[in-house]
Amino acid sequence: MINFDLPDFAGKNVVFVGKGREGLSFEKFINEQGGIKSFMFIDEKIDGPKYLDKLKKFDMDQTIVVKTPGCPGHKMPVPYTTATRVFFDCVKQTGAKSVGITGTKGKTTTASLMTAILLDAGIDARLCGNNGHPMLETLDNATMNTVFVVELSSYQLAELEVSPDVAMITNLFRDHTEYHGGIDKYWEAKRNIVRYMDENGALVFNPEDEIILHWMAESKAQQMPINSKEEVDMSKVKLIGDHNKLNYLMAKKAAGLFGIDALTCHGVFEDFEPVRHRLQPVRTVNGVTYVDDSIGSTPEATIAGIKALVHNKGPIGCILLGGVDRGYDFQELVDLIYRIGIPKIVFFPDTGSIIKKMLPEPYKPDIFETKSMEEAVLWARENTPSGSICLLSTAAPSTVLWKSFEEKGSLFQTEVLKLS
């Protein structure tokens, strides 16, 4: 086990805000490494809606507060740090390299693919971050030859004051404005992945994204734009869609920094399995193929999923839409659904009713409105045309009815597996 130098924690009382998986991971790590005096959690579910007020009662000279990404920083009444900051401090102490990956969509697939490419090349690559692998748990026995592939959400980036050695930005769409307090603050949180780079850092990006081009005009980092028009042989690849081609081009460009050739990258790409809940075929029943794209929680992501399936797999006979109202613009999605003539639609609250009202007058799909995944799948079984696809891609976040997109997708798969 590596012994890390964490002087800010020595002899202090540690209070962690939020008792989730990351908090439990941090508790174990800091008890082993921090030389702390005590550790405790405060959490809204345990301490009530005014749980953050408890922080004001602690002596800040003797206490260090650590915040979960799920709690917005502007709500914190006292100074704090984060597990992400501690992780990057520890990575620096090992001399290892870090590859940080962010974007509104595509970061989990890109991070997983990048890790697979590095591992295939014999590199000690460790995947962690927003994908559910707590960062601090991946530090054991790391060396200067280790490469940490870190998926970073805007929540994690918001308080970060160091950039990874290599950064990748898959894309930028409107999202998480409620958490950050506006779209500009969301962009600024994302920008932290490159903000602190010097000339030794490198950013892989799509130059068609004008926001990133503005960032790079003020950055010392090495610029590594992909060519989105580059031809990629997708004939044997299990991932589908132009968005996954772009994810691959990002990973291939970054892999070049580690001396990995294009042929090796493409071989890994062909063998790579789709990440769960991302255009994942569940099964085919009575000629209907059920596809779980529950990660599709913005209009742009759902549009990408629809286009990928229509161009590569076949017509969509039914789509399940609706979730949290974050003020998204659904017009382009509605236009696409109308243009390709999806005949059956299931609407969940809250945005289901918004999209329903936007459907143009000549378009008369059969519609079913529900709060139940079981009812949705049963209705789809009875109504989706044979030879087509039933797609779960809600174009809005899941938390009106479910805790997360993972729970939503898992329920969908469970109900589909029950069909006969």
Image: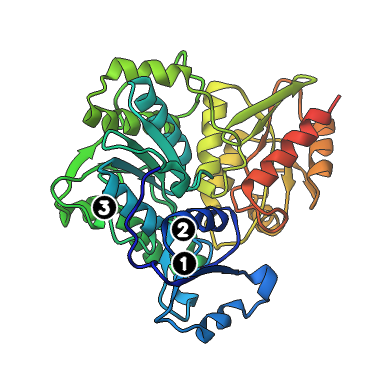
Amino acid type, mark 1: Val
Amino acid type, mark 2: Ile
The answer to whether marks 2 and 3 mark residues whose Cβ atoms lie closer than 8 Å is no
Q: Is residue 148 above or below residue 331?
A: above
Secondary element under disc 3, as helix, strand or loop, is helix
At x 70%, y 39%, the residue is 410
Of the image marks 3 and 1, the number of the one nearer the N terminus: 1
The answer for how far apart the CA atoms under marks 2 and 1 are is 11 Å
Q: Residues within 10 Å of mark 2 (few under 14, many from 20)?
A: many
Secondary element under disc 1, as helix, strand or loop, is strand
Of the image marks 2 and 3, the number of the one nearer the N terminus: 2
Position in image of residue 89 (x %, y %): 31, 55
The residue carrying mark 1 is 66
Q: Nearer the viewer, residue 141 or 361?
A: 141
Position in image of residue 244 (x %, y %): 44, 31
Q: Nearer the viewer, mark 2 or mark 3?
A: 2
At x 51%, y 43%, the residue is 133
The residue carrying mark 2 is 30
The answer for how far apart the CA atoms under marks 2 and 3 are is 28 Å
Q: Is residue 262 above or below residue 251?
A: above
The answer for how far apart the CA atoms under marks 3 and 1 are is 23 Å
Q: Quadrant of the C terminus?
A: top right
The quarter holding residue 168 reads top left
The residue carrying mark 3 is 194
Amino acid type, mark 3: Val
The answer to whether marks 2 and 1 mark residues whose Cβ atoms lie closer than 8 Å is yes
Q: Residues within 10 Å of mark 1 (few under 14, many from 20)?
A: many
Position in image of residue 42 (x %, y %): 59, 71
